[in-house]
Amino acid sequence: MAGGLGTRLQMGEKPMVRLLGQPLIDRVISALQESSVAKVLVAATASVPETRRWAEEAGIEVVETPGEGYVPDMIYAVEKAGIDEPVLIVMADLPLLRGDIVDEIIEVYENVPEPALSVHTPLEIYRRIGGKPDALFNYQGRFIVPSGVNVLLGSKIRFEQEDYHLILDRIELAVNVNSPRDLAICESILRGDLKI
């Protein structure tokens, strides 16, 4: 999912914001390509022409979505791509994601009975790195934060799907780049200045 305007970040198209010289989307795509994911698609809106151009030049199929919001655009992209099987949805602002983590998520999904899976991180991670989550849920007495990674059944994309809550204590899933502070945290982690 790469159609956001990045209004809070205020650095142009968010997927194209550079982290140590590399676009955020490039880091996410690389993680997906290193995983067992069969095919990668970029869902982009008319508001992100540089992102679209970057994806096309990288040989990645782009599905242009209407720009009506995250959920409507996700539904549109999955239907437009004709995906009926399980589909991994990842936001383009998760630059610390790695292929082995993606595979761990997929393996868990394949072994749970629920048709969908949502990935969360514990609130404690944010306290350790000085981050501030956008959303917070109390799940079975534990505060968790959605990571922006989900698995959904494509054939039921228009319907609410019962999901398994996978809680991973992984810093790589905790830092969505929504602000200059988030970008600085990622830089510190990648440079080794912030120990995790």
Image (cartoon, helix red, strand yellow):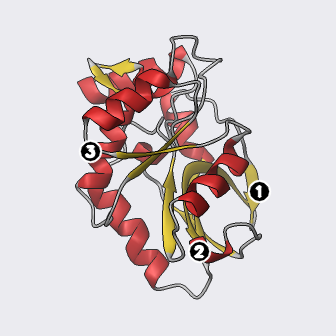
The residue lying at 65 percent from left, 47 percent from top is 73
The three-letter amino acid code for the residue at tag 3 is: Ser
The three-letter amino acid code for the residue at tag 2 is: Leu
Q: Identify the secondary structure beneath mark 3.
A: helix
Q: Left of 90 or right of it: where is 159?
A: right
Residue 19, image x and y in percent? 34, 21
Residue 153 is labelled as 2
* Among the 4 quarters of the image, the one containing residue 96: top left
The residue lying at 76 percent from left, 70 percent from top is 159
Residue 100, image x and y in percent? 28, 60
The three-letter amino acid code for the residue at tag 1 is: Asn
* Among the 4 quarters of the image, the one containing residue 51: top left
The residue indicated by pointer 3 is 30
Q: Identify the secondary structure beneath mark 2.
A: strand
Residue 26 is labelled as none
Q: Earlier in the sequence, mark 2 or mark 1?
A: 1
Residue 159 or residue 49, whichever sits in front: 49
Q: Left of 12 or right of it: where is 118?
A: right
